[in-house]
Image (spheres, rainbow, N blue to C red):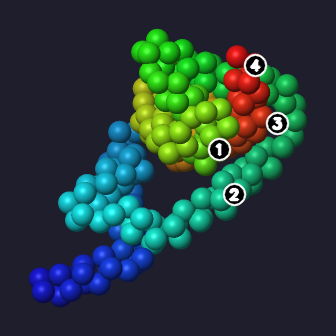
């Protein structure tokens, strides 16, 4: 026990704390999800967020101290997103044939996500800054922060909304698709990537290769379309 305390004191004072805690918690959460058969409610990202938040709260560790180590994992987010291009390249002939419907579906899905968020925020009489932070909720967090800053929102709040949206989609999508009798993996994946960006795409990749490929495509399309069109739409609204 004394050795454990000494190790904790050492790790908590160095960037190794954030790195070690993140990797350790995620590996345990992934093992638990695998043991349970990967049900949607046992999403390892959701479990890791909850456990890490409780760990920081109980230990009194400031977030900047944690992130000084976790940033090494954060850096890998970029290469991970780029890696999603490989399954798309494998399906390039199919994607060329469906290019028109895919772009139209991305426009419709992204527009519905942003419009419904803004409408709900205004119906609840939320402050303007909060409503603008809600608008890019279905875009991956780094891009959502940039869009929120352009349209008068709060970047940090936009990131929180984006992560929450991704987690809700990853946990609930299977049950919603089953209720709507949507069975085609490509359709399920594209819808999940459109609404729940990277976290949804990660979940789709766990379930089916086609679903994961189309979720990655939807994620990329939403990044481009939202970054171009959302600031323009709010400028003339």
Q: Quadrant of residue 30?
A: bottom left
Give left or right: position of 102 versus 204.
right
Q: Secondary structure at mark 1?
A: helix
Q: Position of residue 25 (x, y in %)?
A: 34, 63
Query: Is tag 4's residue or tag 2's residue first in the polypeptide sequence?
Result: 2
Residue assigned mark 1:
146
- Residue 122 drawn above or below residue 151: above
Q: Nearer the viewer, residue 41 or 235?
A: 235
Q: Which residue is mark 2?
A: 83
Quadrant in which residue 118 is drawn: top right
**Dot 4: within a 10 Å radius of its alpha carbon, few (fewer than 14), some, or many (20 or more) residues?**
few
Measuring 42% from the left and 77% from the top, which residue is drawn there? 15
Q: Nearer the viewer, mark 2 or mark 1?
A: 1
Circle 4 SS class = loop
Q: Residues within 10 Å of mark 3 (few under 14, many from 20)?
A: some
Mark whose residue sits in front, 4 or 3: 4
């Amino acid at each position: 026990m004394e050795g454990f305390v000494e190790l904790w004191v050492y790790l908590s004072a160095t960037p190794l704390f954030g790195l070690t805690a993140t990797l350790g918690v995620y590996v345990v959460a992934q093992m638990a999800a695998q043991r349970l058969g990967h049900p949607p409610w046992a999403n390892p990202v959701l479990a890791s967020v909850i456990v890490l938040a409780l760990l920081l709260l109980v230990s009194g560790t400031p977030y900047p101290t944690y992130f000084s180590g976790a940033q090494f994992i954060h850096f890998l987010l970029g290469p991970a997103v780029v890696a999603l291009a490989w399954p798309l390249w494998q399906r390039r002939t199919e994607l060329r044939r469906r290019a028109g419907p895919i772009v139209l579906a991305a426009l419709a899905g992204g527009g519905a996500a942003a419009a419904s968020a803004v409408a709900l925020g205004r119906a609840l009489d939320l402050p303007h800054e909060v409503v603008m932070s809600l608008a890019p909720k279905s875009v991956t967090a780094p891009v959502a922060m940039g869009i929120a800053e352009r349209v008068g929102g709060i970047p940090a709040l936009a990131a929180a909304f984006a992560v929450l949206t991704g987690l809700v989609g990853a946990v609930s999508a299977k049950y919603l698709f089953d209720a709507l009798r949507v069975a085609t993996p490509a359709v399920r994946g594209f819808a999940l990537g459109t609404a729940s960006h990277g976290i949804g795409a990660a979940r789709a990749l766990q379930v089916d290769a086609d679903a994961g490929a189309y979720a990655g495509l939807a994620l990329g399309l939403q990044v481009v379309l939202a970054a171009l069109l959302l600031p323009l739409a709010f400028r003339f609204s």
